[in-house]
Image (cartoon, rainbow, N blue to C red):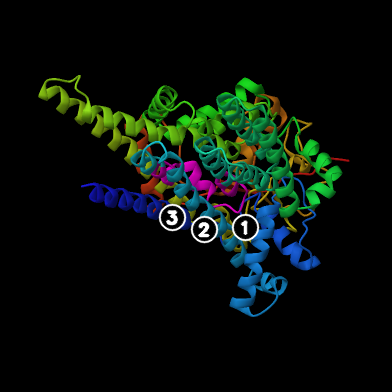
Amino acid sequence: MKSASSWWLRAWLAVAVLVGSALRFVGLTFGFPLRVHPDEWAIIDNAIDLAKRNSFEPTFVDRPDHFEIKLNFLVDSVYAWLRHGMSLVEAYTKHPLEFVFIGRGISAVFGVACIVLAYLIVRRIAPWAGVVAAGLVAVFPPLVLNSHYATPESPQLFFTLLLMLFCMMYLESPRTLFVVLAAASVGVGCTIKYPAIITAVMIAVVVTVVAVRKRDGWLFLRHGLVAVGSVLATIAVVSPVLITGFGRVHEAVFRMAVPEHLGADGLGWAGNAGFYASTFLGSAGLLLAVAALGGAVWSLRHHPISTLPIWAGLVYWLIMSGVALHWTRWAVPMYVTPLLFGGIGIYALVTWVWRTTLLTAGWQRLLAKAVVVLGLALLAVNQLLSATVVSASLTAKDTRVVGRDYTKSIGATKKNTIFEGYTPMLPYAPWGVFDQFDLSSGELKLSQKALDPAKFLILSGGMRARYLAESKYAAEQEFYRAVTESLPQLRVIEPVTQGPPSVWEPLNIQGQAAVLAGYLGGGFSGPAIYFYDLSAVPRAPG
């Protein structure tokens, strides 16, 4: 009987890994033949830069992404030699998109590995809880999405989970080895993204707990020093330039910590915390959120010490909310805490309902089981469908690719077209066009510095939405209004419309099904692209 149960456990874990793999590897060519992601250059291009300089030390220190840059460089170099029989620089020059695909594939591999780590962490509480947690990590939409990008989020999550695992192992057996491994996870994390140092708090917590329980102050001091030394040693091994060039690192950190950024500022600590919480709730739905809360409460009652490392995401949430800016991708390490507790909560609920003696009547037990099964079915369908929509959106043709073909048909080029960022002519970065126009007379005119000749204007719904979202951009909003009212519109390329998610699973399932149908019907992904005729627009006098 036990062997049969073990077989089913392994089978369901395999299903979680296979489903999570499919969701992450389908859609890695999104945007091709264009590069449409604004941040992938930091890893992909800097990996190529190592080859150009014949060096293994990146010059880019802003995030810093050094672990991924070096890993991409190594994988890219092997691929260039095996596949093309040439140097990386030469192969990249001839086949650049292949290396973009490799960078995304590396993130996908880390994303799949996170599914396995989720199981290894939560199985220490209960094996079936670990399977449920692995399933939640496999299909949680933001994790699926970020596993497609050649960006730091997926590797950072991997090392956050690795930290949790080693901290749990330390609580079970307080050996120096586990301190070193946990600290090494933090060290590698810091070479990926500087805020990973926040997770070192969890090492301090578990070392303190063990020292207090053992009443061993020397253990606290010894393991504390080992942890600090191991973090620094790992950073020095992975990327010594972060140690030797600390002045540049210090300057980069403060330069990147800007208080303002279009569409990502002005909320304050409470606003940022609420933003991250709401993004989780929107992706999770009410049932998963309740399961996570229940799992956290159950863990505090039954396993308060052994589940301490799982709270690392909460610590990250509280501290990162103090940063001036807010981005949805920054929440990825935060999500893992409620997802792991969600696995525990679902397991605890099912176990209680199936074993409880409080429900004496047969109809009561049957009703309770039916309610639980229905709730879990809604949760599973909602998560799997939402994750499928993510992958479907990444396989759909991008509006910027469609727009590129249209620009050729009308003769629009960079020499005769004014264009915003996130459009066919600049698909991967933000860019404004406000200095190209003059509204001082109340009429939309080309400014003196505007492109000459200017025959076409291309705007992006992605840029427009950021400016329309906040009242402080009144002048920019007036520009968009003037364009809409006064310029002849040549074409609009609309993506599949996807509204905000609903926390109510039945409503969200209905909305996600409609979106999926749109993509399956040939709908586009990406921002809306607007084409206007500028041929009759006068130029403002000098």
Residue 397: in magenta span: no
- Contact check, label 2 and label 3, Cβ < 8 Å: no
Q: In the image, which disc is placed on residue 28? A: 2
- Residue 239 as seen in the image, left or right of residue 321: right
Q: Residues within 10 Å of mark 2 (few under 14, many from 20)?
A: many
- Residue 396 visible, this angle: no
C-alpha span from label 2 to label 3? 12 Å
Which mark, by number, is residue 35? 1
Left-right relation of 482 to 397? right
**Magenta region includes residue 155:** yes
Q: Residue 175: x and y, percent? A: 58, 41
Callout 1: helix, strand or loop?
A: loop
Q: Which numbered disc flags the more N-terminal residue, 2 or 1?
A: 2
| Mark 2–mark 1 distance (CA, rounded to whole Å) | 12 Å
Three-letter code for the amino acid on which mark 3 is drawn:
Ser
User: Which percent across, then down, holds residue 85?
Assistant: 64, 80
Span of residues in magenta: 134-158
Left or right, 238 with reference to 213: right
Q: Residue furthest bottom?
A: 85
Q: In front here: 172 or 490?
A: 172
Name the residue at 63% across, 55% down: 424
Q: Which residue is tagged 3?
A: 21
Q: Which part of the image, by quadrant, shows the C terminus?
A: top right
Q: Dominant secondary structure of the magenta stretch?
A: helix
Crowd tier of the residue under label 1, counting other residues whose Cα lies within 10 Å: few below 14, some 14–19, many 20 or above: many
Tag 2: amino acid: Leu
Q: Position of residue 153 (x, y in %)?
A: 59, 45
Q: Residue at x 38, y 44 (%)?
A: 135
| Camera-side mark, 2 or 3 | 3
